[in-house]
Amino acid sequence: MGVGREKMVMTSGYACEGKEGRKGICRLSSSSSSSFFLSCLIFPKQAEQSRGRAEPGRKGVAMAAVLKVYADRLSQPSRAIIIFCKVNRIDFQELTVDLAKGQHRAHEFTKINPMAQVPTIVDGRFKLFESHAILRYLATVFPGVPHHWYPADLFTRAKLESVLDWHHSNLRRGAATYVLHTALGPALGLTPSPEAAKEAEKLLSRSLGTIETVWLKGDAKFLNGNPQPSIADLSLVCEIMQLEVVGDERRDRILGPHEKVRAWMENVKKATSPHFDEVHQLIFKLKARLNPASKL
């Protein structure tokens, strides 16, 4: 895994048994979307045993390298990473990369992340980008993180992974495009496209409906009916919070019909309080600047 906190045995194949007693061969594949932590996925018992063991120097030694988080709090995935670290008491250094000033394109940063995007982390000599991969890494590697964030059970984790895979091409594409072509684009001096905004709103509304009908069935407090939040809950709610910058009227028009989504968002906020609101303060300030009549 690159940082040496957990000793995972990586082989071409192992017999494994699911919770329903089915046995088979689990093979490691670099093409899998979650292959980075596949050893933990396949061997939950081994992961359970090793999860509490930090590498020498990680816990209680002043010389241990502090996790560096490169982020911009105006970025929804950046906020998810920062909130996760704060909630789980992960010691980290937040390094702001100002997207509006183009700092993500600076040579110093692209040496760390060639994709020129935030969030990005540096943990010792290990560098990682893409928010979902970072959340998996943090939940798996750092001791003391409760298992509900990234469950060891193979079936529960696989369902969580399906939400994360769905997120970027559906909810994120709809929300980010809508925000860009309504409020954020004009603020950055870009010419918005009303047609793009209209299509994005349709995709966003469909995505919110999908969340309600597929992952928030019944009286579920969190996605997949889990009693506590996962990294998927945090990632998706931070995405939806980006709608704050479009103003109360637009936000309420989109979220209004989705009572389950609104209740679920409140559950995630409460579960991550007080860090959720604190990390979103920059978004609220931007909202006030772009929409003076909106209520905070």
Image (spheres, rainbow, N blue to C red):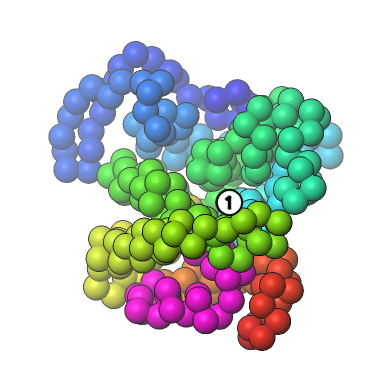
Give percent across and percent down for residue 94: 76, 49
Which of 292/25 is in front? 292
Quadrant in which the C terminus is drawn: bottom right
Residue 156 left/right relative to 85:
left
Q: Amino acid at mark 1?
A: Pro
Q: Residue at x 15, y 34 (%)?
A: 22
Give percent across and percent down for residue 59: 71, 41
Give percent across and percent down for residue 175: 48, 59
Q: Is residue 49 magenta?
A: no
Q: Residue at x 32, y 62 (%)?
A: 206
Inspect this view and state whether residue 157 appears.
no
Inspect this view and state whether residue 42 appears.
yes
Direction right: furthest residue: 62
- Main SS category, magenta section: helix
Q: Which residues are magenta?
A: 237-263
Which of 210/80 is in front? 210
Q: Which residue is mark 1?
A: 77
Residue 244's image quarter?
A: bottom right
Give percent across and percent down for residue 110: 72, 29
Can you say whether 73 is above or below 209 in the image?
Answer: above
Quadrant in which the N terminus is drawn: top right
Residue 286's image quarter?
A: bottom right
